Amino acid sequence: MSDAVGGAGDADQGLEALAQAKGVDTHWWDWRGEHRVVPTSSLRAVLTAMGEDVSDDAAVATALERTRTAPWRRTLPPTVVQREGDPLRLLVHVPHGAAVRVHVELERGAARELDQLEHVVEPMEIDGRLVGEAAFEVPTHLPLGWHALRAEVDGGPVAGGTDRAVLVTVPQRLDLPPVVQEAPRSGLMTQIYQVRGSGSQGIGDLGDLATLGEWAARVHDAHFVLVNPLHAAEPVAPMEPSPYLPTSRRFLNPVHIDLRALPGLDDLPPSARGEVDDLAGRARELNEHDTIDRDAVWELKRAALRTAFRHLGPTHADEVAALHAREGPALVDFATWCSLAATHGTLWESQWPEELHDPGSPAVEAHREAHRGEISFVAWTQWVVRAQLAAAQQRLRAAGMGIGVIADLAVGIHPEGADAWALGDALARGIDVGAPPDQFNQLGQNWSQPPWRPDRLAELGYAPFRDMIRAVLADAGGLRVDHVIGLFRLWWVPEHAGPGEGAYVRYDHEALIGILALEAHRAGALVIGEDLGVVEPWVREHLVERGILGTSVAWFEWGQDGRPLPPEEYRELCLATVTTHDLPPSAGYLALEHVAIRERLDLLTRSVEEERAAEEGSIRAVREALAERGLLADVDAPVADVVAALHRWLELTPSRLRGIALTDLVGDVRAVNQPGTDEEYPNWRLPLAGPDRAPMSLDRVVEG
């Protein structure tokens, strides 16, 4: 039998029907416009990861029947999402002939009865009994927020617990902040760990973020600083260098704590203060290194923080208690995972004893009791890093920035990290997130991250997604969502399969985008969706409709005539930039640094001569376009002149946000990341550097 779906027989047709019913695409179009069919083996792996038994034809048939009748097996759907002001017809299922009443309990405490609508439909036999269907009208004037639906069914619901549901009322559209509505705004983009000043402790920290932002506001009239994800990494070596492969997206990485600005530092006893200062001084020596050694930095910072905690922890008890109240059990789970990782290693699924795999197990509870001090220390460091981020945001706003920090949300998490441990079956197992082959990653990508399970998110009322968004927005004026297309569909790659052998899995984008808009509205923040790569046209239309900004990168913007897209034709609702962290800085791109790296690492799928010729042709076309617009004096002008002209090009766009990479301002040429690599290239480890590739201090940036 062929390993592709598409008319091979009844068995394949059943599998294809189940896949489609579960939101799994069985066909797709690649970046060259060629039609592809998902291998049967991949469909089976994806459906298995979604909790379906596809072991044989009978199991597939049973799974398909249960999927098609799933709404009839519940009295209320697990989650209902309503756009503010929109009428909504709610279908309710009850034992045939049973009376039912439904009301909504509003987030702030009031309750409202729902009116039943005329609705005549034949009952359906489910597992040997008849189930009927009724319809109710959800009021159009509900306030924004997280509400609850309650059904009262004579004789009880169709299944236990299904008489309760989450109702989320979300904005029609996320309004831009007034400062962005007034005029297009520019700002900096930077990998904050790269930005080391003379007082930094081996890595760019939150104090450096504030210093950089104040300078950008003063000198460049910048209204934001877009940073890399500040999500938590491993608490012990080896710390994952990629900020896009965190152990948790809900909590922060304390490696970015600035020891110079610890709350209560001046209240430490002289001996403790001396110890902290000595450790900070040893960490400063790491600034001289050409690569960032997170493990060495954290070893020194952690020792300093432990010393400070012994004396300051009790004085900050109220503040930490408030953090516990906001984050709930998730903070305890995260701190427990960190403590367990320090004892058993950071790979919980492959290194820890089986009895520790469940966060609610007696063995885990016993560990919590035995390591209360360590867990309290982790929670305290989370309070410190959040307090410093909040202080940085306050300094940026005080300096005149209308937005301030724009946080970055990674597309996923480490498969054996804290979130993967705590979130359980909300995540799919045996599956990695990635991307199919495209122009810049012609072998495809496997990001080694487990995806959300769409069905479990709905069953959980989207609480894990909501809580993550809230946490990332807590001290930010904006949020960039990496690979925002993942809120519509994600490329699932089965374990042991190549990146090109995956399948697209659909998500309830109405729910996810709506919740994102609701939480951003409540935080007074804007949202940028990184919508690069292969994107279905309707997706960008939906993002515009919901007030989510897109992303335009000059090197990727081409007109149908094969020439650079004129700046006036850029999208208005987007962040326009020259480059991105997956490309070298502009000076390096113009010098074909990206081609040289991929040639050296054997990542090209065509000859280097073809690749170089194609890139040189594109760069020549850009130079010519800049010259035609009078932005470049000579088509063969020096690289620095071309970089400056490219940023003047952005000023001609209608885009509401324009991002300037700090690496472009200082003439850096080194790529911070080469997609599709791990240890072959020093990804995420290179500090800010000048044109000579030598590290450049933040002091030199702000004083120059």
Image (cartoon, helix red, strand yellow):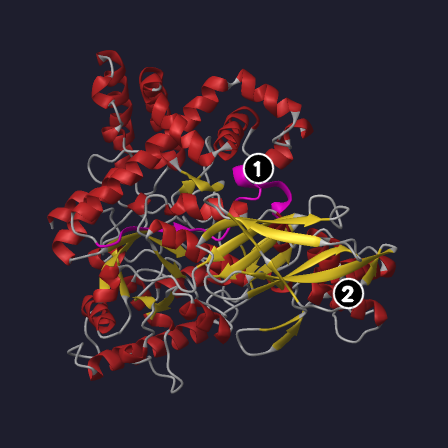
- Image quarter hosting the N terminus: bottom right
Point out the stretch of residues depicted in magenta.
402-428
Q: Nearer the viewer, residue 362 or 1?
A: 362
Query: Which residue, given by chain and number where applicable, does mark 1 sit on?
Result: 422
Q: Is residue 426 magenta?
A: yes
Left or right: 221, with 273 as reference point? left
Q: Nearer the viewer, residue 207 or 697?
A: 207
Q: Nearer the viewer, residue 572 or 625?
A: 572
Q: Residue 178 location in percent, x, y? A: 25, 60
Q: Is residue 659 magenta?
A: no
Q: Residue at x 58, y 21 (%)?
A: 367
Residue 147 in view, yes or no = yes
Q: Which mark is residue 15?
A: 2
| Label 1 environment density (alpha carbons within 10 Å; few <14, some 14–19, many ≥20) | some
Left or right: 535, with 528 as reference point? right
Residue 243 in view, yes or no = no
Q: Amino acid at mark 1?
A: Ala
Which comes sooner in the sequence, label 1 or label 2? 2
Q: Amino acid at mark 2?
A: Leu
| Label 2 environment density (alpha carbons within 10 Å; few <14, some 14–19, many ≥20) | many
Left or right: 605, with 353 as reference point? left
Left or right: 11, with 107 as reference point? right
Q: Residue 628 location in percent, x, y? A: 21, 84
